[in-house]
């Protein structure tokens, strides 16, 4: 805390008052230290794939390019690393637009039950496609359970961004779960809000990390997240998007048992009758 004092002196020489300015520097210092940490994180996140790319390119240059077995593998790795960097840069641009307030929302009134079902059907299709594709090594198996409120719930959202958020939480639920897990997706209502939740039977999140899970670049297990292609920015972006939509996002988790991610949004209060009256 910085404090400045100055005396107010009248022309006559009398001291008629005292001005005291208290300036809270802790907040400023916190912001500055977070900014430094962020720049350091970005540099590190970019250096890792670049260093790896460089060593594979060096090996190719040193003769590996002539080896018909090794060369394609090494090229594939460099391509994956380039993809990771592009993902990271896109995520960073996205966040920076939201930070500066230049991100535009394309708001529309959407039937949440229908939209959530549509997103989940896409995830079901991915497993089916995977099971029918004999060329590919199979990725993880999972079952999606749906428990939706019977009432149709309307919300005002930016559909593309909202889909991005749900995709991210669903992908995490799959990524951080064992093979064959069940993912339960719910839509519930409170008086004024709709609560959408996604529950997995995965690793869970240690209690001490719960408060940091939406921080930029925070990962419970850095190596595991990187190995799975994660940028560590997905949940930070999700939080920004949901807050821009005047909603809330949070998580409850039991280590070794699983996690539930919740999104609450204000819903538009008209019953189905009102919609038909419009014509
Ligand atoms: P990442 O790209 O690393 O997945 P996210 O921002 O999406 O980045 O998630 C941040 C971290 O939160 C992850 O690295 C992981 O440690 C943890 N996490 C996210 N979702 C889950 C989940 N469903 N179960 C367990 N841990 C999770």
Image: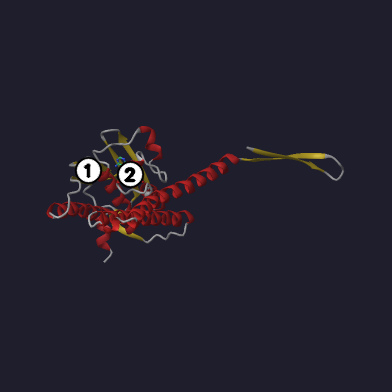
Which residue is rendered at x = 51% and y = 46% of the image? 36
- Quadrant containing ligand 1 reads top left
- Tell me if I can see residue 106 in this picture: yes
The N terminus sits in image quarter = top right
Please state which of the two labelled residues, at mark 1 or mark 2, is closer to the viewer.
2
Report the residue that reaches farthest toward the right: 12
On screen, residue 35 versus residue 49, left or right, reads: right
Q: Nearer the viewer, residue 86 or 151?
A: 86
Residue 185, given in percent of the width and then of the height, sits at 24, 45
Query: Relative to 262, is 135 above or below?
Result: below
On screen, residue 13 versus residue 24, left or right, reads: right
Residue located beneath label 2 in the image: 225
Query: Relative to 142, is 114 above or below?
Result: below
Which residue is rendered at x = 22% and y = 40% of the image? 178
Quadrant in the picture for residue 109? bottom left
Kind of element beneath mark 1: strand
Residue located beneath label 1 in the image: 184
Q: Earlier in the sequence, mark 1 or mark 2?
A: 1
Residue 216, given in percent of the width and then of the height, sits at 42, 46
Quadrant in the picture for residue 158? bottom left
- Tell me if I can see residue 191 in this picture: no
Residue 249, given in percent of the width and then of the height, sits at 36, 45
Quadrant in the picture for residue 83? bottom left
Q: Residues within 10 Å of mark 2 (few under 14, many from 20)?
A: some
Q: Nearer the viewer, residue 68 or 13?
A: 68
Mark 2, ligand 1, within 8 Å: the answer is yes
Query: Marks 1/2: CA distance?
Result: 22 Å
Which residue is rendered at x = 38% and y = 36% of the image? 209
Kind of element beneath mark 2: helix
On screen, residue 88 versus residue 75, left or right, reads: right
């Amino acid at each position: 805390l910085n404090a400045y004092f100055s005396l107010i002196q009248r022309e006559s020489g009398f001291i008629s008052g005292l001005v005291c300015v208290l300036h809270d520097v802790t907040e400023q210092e916190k912001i500055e230290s977070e900014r430094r940490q962020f720049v350091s994180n970005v540099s590190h996140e970019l250096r890792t794939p670049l260093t790896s790319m460089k060593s594979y390119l060096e090996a190719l240059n040193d003769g590996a390019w002539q080896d018909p077995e090794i060369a394609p593998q090494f090229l594939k790795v460099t391509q994956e690393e380039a993809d990771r960097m592009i993902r990271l840069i896109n995520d960073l641009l996205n966040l920076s637009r939201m930070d500066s307030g230049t991100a535009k929302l394309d708001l529309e009134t959407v039937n949440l039950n229908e939209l959530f079902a549509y997103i989940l059907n896409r995830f079901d299709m991915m497993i089916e496609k995977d099971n029918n594709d004999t060329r590919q090594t199979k990725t993880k198996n999972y079952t999606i359970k749906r428990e939706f409120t019977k009432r149709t719930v309307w919300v005002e959202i930016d559909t593309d961004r909202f889909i991005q958020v749900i995709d991210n939480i669903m992908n995490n639920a799959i990524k951080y779960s064992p093979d064959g897990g069940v993912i339960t997706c719910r839509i519930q209502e409170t008086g004024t809000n709709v609560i959408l939740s996604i529950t997995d039977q995965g690793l869970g999140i240690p209690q001490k990390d719960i408060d940091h899970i939406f921080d930029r670049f925070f990962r419970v297990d850095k190596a595991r997240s990187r190995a799975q292609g994660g940028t560590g920015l997905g949940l930070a972006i999700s939080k920004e998007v949901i807050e821009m939509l005047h909603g809330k996002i949070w998580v409850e988790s039991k280590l070794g048992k699983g996690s539930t991610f919740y999104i609450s949004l204000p819903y538009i209060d008209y019953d189905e009758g009102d919609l038909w009256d419009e014509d």
